[in-house]
C-alpha cells in the first residue's frame, strides 16, 4: 500500500479509538483496554470488582486494521510494550505522585487522554521522555503550596514537552 493509504487507515483508527476510549474510561470497573501481542486494541470485560470475567480478546488471523500485516506504525512499538494499557498509565502517574507533591487527581481526563495518545501515536520512548520531563519539573517543587493550579501547571509542562518534541 501507498504511504497515503496507510496514513488514512491510521487516522481512521485514531478516531475510532477516541470514541471508544471515553466510553471505556467512564466504566473502569467493567472494562480494561490494552494491546495484544499483535498490536491490536484489546478490550477485556471485567467484573464489577475488577476481576476478569471472560477470555481475553484475540486478534483476527491477519489483515484487520492495525494488524501485524498492515504495516501500521504502532504495531512494532506495541510488541515492545508487551500489552501496555491504561492501567500502566495509572501506575506511572502514581509513581510520579509518590516522588513529587502532585496527586493523581491533578491528572484529569484530558491529560490522561493526551498521555495515551502519545503512547498510541509516538510510542513508549516518547511517553518515557514525557514522564521524565514531568518528573524533573514536578520533583523541583517541595510542597503543593508552591503551585496554585496544579492541573494548569502539569498541562503547561505537557504542552511545553509537545512543542519541544515537535521541534526536534
Image (spheres, rainbow, N blue to C red):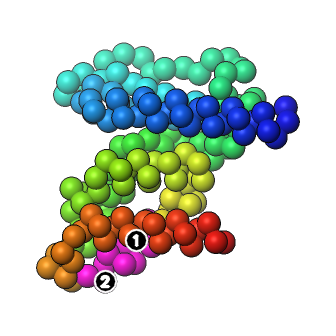
**Residue 45, placed above or below residue 68:** above
Which quarter of the rendered picture does the N terminus lie within?
top right
Which quarter of the rendered picture does the C terminus lie within?
bottom right
Q: Which residues are magenta?
A: 131-141
In this rendered view, identify the residue nearer to me: 37 or 64. 64
* Disc marking residue 140: 2
In the image, residue 136 lies in the stretch drawn in magenta = yes
Classify mark 1: residues with Cα within 10 Å, few (<14), some (14-19) or many (20+).
some
Circle nearer the N terminus (1, 2): 2
In this rendered view, identify the residue nearer to me: 40 or 151. 151
Q: Give x and y (percent) for residue 107.
A: 29, 57
In this rendered view, identify the residue nearer to me: 114 or 124. 114
Q: Give x and y (percent) for residue 87.
A: 35, 43
Q: Is residue 26 left or right of residue 133?
A: left
Q: Secondary structure at mark 1?
A: helix
Residue at far right of view: 2
Q: Secondary structure at mark 2?
A: loop
Q: Nearer the viewer, mark 1 or mark 2?
A: 1
Residue 99 seen in the figure = no
- Measure the C-alpha gap from mark 1 to mark 2: 13 Å
Q: Give x and y (percent) for residue 124.
A: 55, 54
Q: Quadrant of residue 26?
A: top left
**Residue 111, placed above or below residue 12:** below
* Disc marking residue 157: 1
In the image, residue 1 lies in the stretch drawn in magenta = no
Q: Is residue 44 left or right of residue 9?
A: left
Q: Quadrant of residue 79?
A: top right
In this rendered view, identify the residue nearer to me: 146 or 127. 146
Residue at 54%, 34% in the rendered image: 15
Amino acid at each position: 500500500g501507498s504511504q497515503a493509504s496507510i496514513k488514512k487507515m491510521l487516522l481512521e483508527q485514531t478516531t475510532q479509538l477516541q470514541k471508544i476510549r471515553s466510553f471505556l474510561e467512564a466504566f473502569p470497573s467493567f472494562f480494561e483496554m490494552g494491546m495484544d501481542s499483535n498490536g491490536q486494541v484489546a478490550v477485556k470485560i471485567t467484573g464489577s470488582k475488577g476481576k476478569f470475567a471472560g477470555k481475553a480478546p484475540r486478534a483476527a488471523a491477519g489483515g484487520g486494521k492495525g494488524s501485524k500485516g498492515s504495516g501500521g506504525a504502532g504495531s512494532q512499538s506495541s510488541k515492545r510494550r508487551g500489552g501496555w494499557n491504561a492501567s500502566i498509565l495509572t501506575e506511572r502517574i502514581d509513581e510520579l505522585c509518590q516522588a513529587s507533591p502532585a496527586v493523581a487527581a491533578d491528572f484529569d481526563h484530558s491529560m490522561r487522554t493526551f498521555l495515551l495518545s502519545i503512547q498510541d501515536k509516538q510510542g513508549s520512548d516518547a511517553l518515557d521522555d514525557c514522564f521524565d520531563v514531568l518528573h524533573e519539573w514536578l520533583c523541583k517543587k517541595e510542597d503543593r503550596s508552591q503551585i496554585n493550579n496544579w492541573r494548569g501547571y502539569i498541562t503547561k509542562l505537557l504542552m511545553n514537552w509537545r512543542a519541544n518534541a515537535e521541534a526536534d
